[in-house]
Image: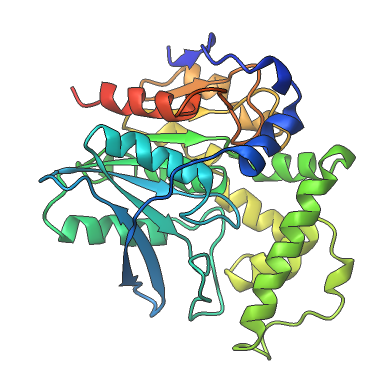
Amino acid sequence: MPVLAHSNYHAPFLLQNRHMMTIYPSLFRKVRPVNYDRVRIDTPDGDFLDLDFSRTGAENDSIVVILHGLEGNSTRKYVLGMVHIFNGEGIDTVSVNFRGCSGEPNRKLRFYHSGETGDLDTVISYLVSLQQYKVIHLVGFSLGGNVTLKYVGERGGSLLPAIRSAVAISVPCDLKGSTAELEKRHNMIYMQRFIRELGEKLRQKQVFFPEDIQLDGYEKIRTFRQFDDRYTGPMHGFRDALDYWEKSSSCNWLHQIRIPTLLINAKDDPFLGPGCFPYAVAAQHDFFFLETPLLGGHVGFVGFGEEYYWTERRALDFILSTRG
């Protein structure tokens, strides 16, 4: 059954620590820039999404949709590495910038969150409307991975036939458990950074929505529970943080997946709680594959002296294997 117990990822000797593995790529990895072709599309509710295409130049009927993580964007190194490896195989890519992540505040009060699959559906509909791409694959990282898994699970057997496979990397598919993990002392540096960056985004939006966004006492917010209770939940139609986490966690939808789907979560990922390793679901599933390398950190999986990181090669191999 699709539990891949023996991963072939081997961490460099100098990066056996999960925090070093997590931090190293953003600080030290060198990735060639991508000459994106940006396209702005409208959403049904009057907002917009910025899509960054990287085309191979040839007539191509296959494309990979890449979704970034929390407070990321299409220029993150993990996104660029994935773009390069698929372009090298002659496959187009489109890197989605979630609402408010493309360098310009979005129009609406709401922005993006871990369970927002409607915007991904808007992107898919746009790609189909181009009448070029007959084959679509999905690759998501962290928050974007949760969106990916939830999307293919929600739609189950009604998923568009053009969508052939999905890969999700370092995914907090159990949001409540992951939030509890991030609140631990050893993860304080990550939590502080996320709260700071989200606060800056709220300050930018407050200019346009001064009556709807109150930032008094924001400096007292220390956890995602506090942030999601005050902002994410109410701004996106949830009762509170717990309601948001329950309804947005992709682990609740995995059993409905009906296309080949690979989840890669390292056992030492500092962001993930026990619920993010759905072995029981994968063991009884025909389409959902779970691979849990011993090491890898969060969106780490570093490889020294290699152009591509292991997750990029693994995603490519998995997607190519689904072509039939």
The residue at the point 66 percent across, 57 percent down is: 243
Where is residue 300? Give x, y as percent.
61, 32
Residue 46 visible (yes or no): yes
Where is residue 317? Give x, y as percent.
34, 22
Vertical relation: 274 (above or below) 206 = above
The one nearer the camera, 261 or 207, is: 207
Left or right: 155 with respect to 98? left
Residue 165 visible (yes or no): no
The residue at the point 40 percent across, 56 percent down is: 96
Tell me how many marks there are.
Answer: 0
Quadrant the N terminus occupies: top left
Where is residue 273? Give x, y as percent.
71, 33
The residue at the point 67 percent across, 75 percent down is: 202
Quadrant the C terminus occupies: top left
Instruction: Please say which color scheme the image uses.
Output: rainbow
Where is residue 310? Give x, y as percent.
49, 24
Q: Quadrant of residue 314?
A: top left
Vertical relation: 194 (above or below) 266 = below
Left or right: 262 with respect to 219? left
